[in-house]
Image (cartoon, rainbow, N blue to C red):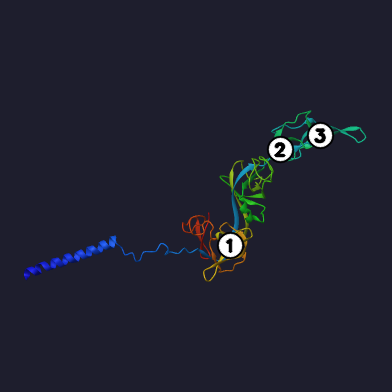
Amino acid sequence: MGIARKWVFPIIWIVIFAVISAALVKIAFFPDQSGAADPAFPSAEIVEPQYVVATGTVRNDVTLAGTVAADEAVPIPATLTGEVREVLVSQGQSVAAGQELLTLRAEVANPDGTSYVDYETVLAPVAGILSSFTALVGQQFSVGNAVGQVAPPSFHVSGSIPPEQLYRLIVRPADAQVTINGGPAPFTCTGLSITSPLAGQGSGSTDGSGSGSGSTTGPVVRCAVPADVVVFAGLTAELVIAGGIAENVLVVPVTAVEGGGGTGNVYFVMPDGSTEIHEVTLGLNDGIMVEVSAGLEDGDVILQFVPGAPGDGTGGGFGDPIRGENCKPVGGGGVVCGG
């Protein structure tokens, strides 16, 4: 009897350990498949980011890279068809506006067949340096022919602007704030102009839309450097064009708007979660947020990204909130991302 009891307990412990080992093997190598997700029915749902419309401030500053260049030389036109009788200056000389440069002589016929001698003195059109002046005594010129050129001592800053940015500058300001890299303190650059090359305009044209160093393919911003600011040709600069400011207005992310030239569409979120397109009237935008002057009300909910657009929240791309590149929180309960 004692011998039987002596072997019973070890056998029981052996059985218990065998059961535990079998259970562990089953868990490790043969997991229960009843809870596995059916790949045909995904268990996760992608929710498109939404934005709650709220008031804010939009400062419409357009920032561009620019270059300092000397103003183009001004041609000196002959005012009479005739020959040079006297040369009063030489190339490389500084001249004042209106200074006498040379005299032209011509014999002019009268209607009755008689003639008389006429003299014209050609004057410098602007102050500067005679960068080109090769007129010689006895040389013939026709009216309008250039007898030389004057390089003014003035400079300008110019830079290319993406055409789509022109929508932000419908009302064109007259000046810009300029910061010269490694130069003087920021200053106001006046006489701001925005021009585009005309069809058929040749390369190297000095039409006043650029620095005269060649043709351009897009709009060019240009403004004059004040005479008391010391700059040099070739310096790089940053131009900031203030297109206005709108305070306490309804704003939405530019990523939420389909379109952008005065009007656009947003995807309005309905109470049942569906969306419908609402047309909106747009105002100022800063490249991240845009003013909505009509079509939405404070508290409305819209999609933060236009469906199907690059970076609509379903993968990489512009404004991708999943990757979080160049994103920042904004009012209205959203996160805005920019390129």
Disc 3 is placed on an element classified as: loop
Residue 297 % position (x, y)? 59, 68
Q: Residue at x 29, y 62 (%)?
A: 30
Left or right side of 138 for 323: left
Earlier residue among tags 2 and 1: 1
Eye-nearest disc, 2 or 1: 1
Point out residue 306 in the picture as x, y percentages from the top left corner. Answer: 55, 60
As shown in the figure, which amino acid type bears the numbered disc 3? Thr
In front of the other: label 3 or label 1? 3
Query: Which label lies toward us, 2 or 3?
Result: 3
State which quadrant residue 104 falls in.
top right
Above or below: residue 324 compared with residue 203: below
Residue at x 25%, y 64% (from the top left corner):
23
Residue found at the far front of this picture: 40
CA gap, disc 3 and disc 1:
63 Å
Q: Is residue 240 left or right of residue 318?
A: right
Image coordinates of residue 267 in percent, x first then y, are: 56, 64
Label 2 SS: strand
Q: Which residue is mark 2?
A: 150
The percent coordinates of residue 88 (x first, y second) are 76, 32
| Mark 2 → mark 1, Cα distance in angstroms | 48 Å
Disc 2 to disc 3, C-alpha distance: 21 Å
- Going by the image, does 144 lie left or right of 332? right
Instruction: Say left or right for 164 vs 78.
Output: left
Residue tagged by mark 3?
81
Query: Which residue matches tag 1?
Result: 57
Foreground residue among 122 and 77:
77
Amino acid of disc 2: Val
Q: Secondary structure at mark 1?
A: strand
Asked if the residue at tag 1 contacts the one at tag 3, i.e. Cβ–Cβ closer than 8 Å, the answer is no
First in residue order: circle 3 vs circle 1: 1
Q: Amino acid at mark 1?
A: Thr
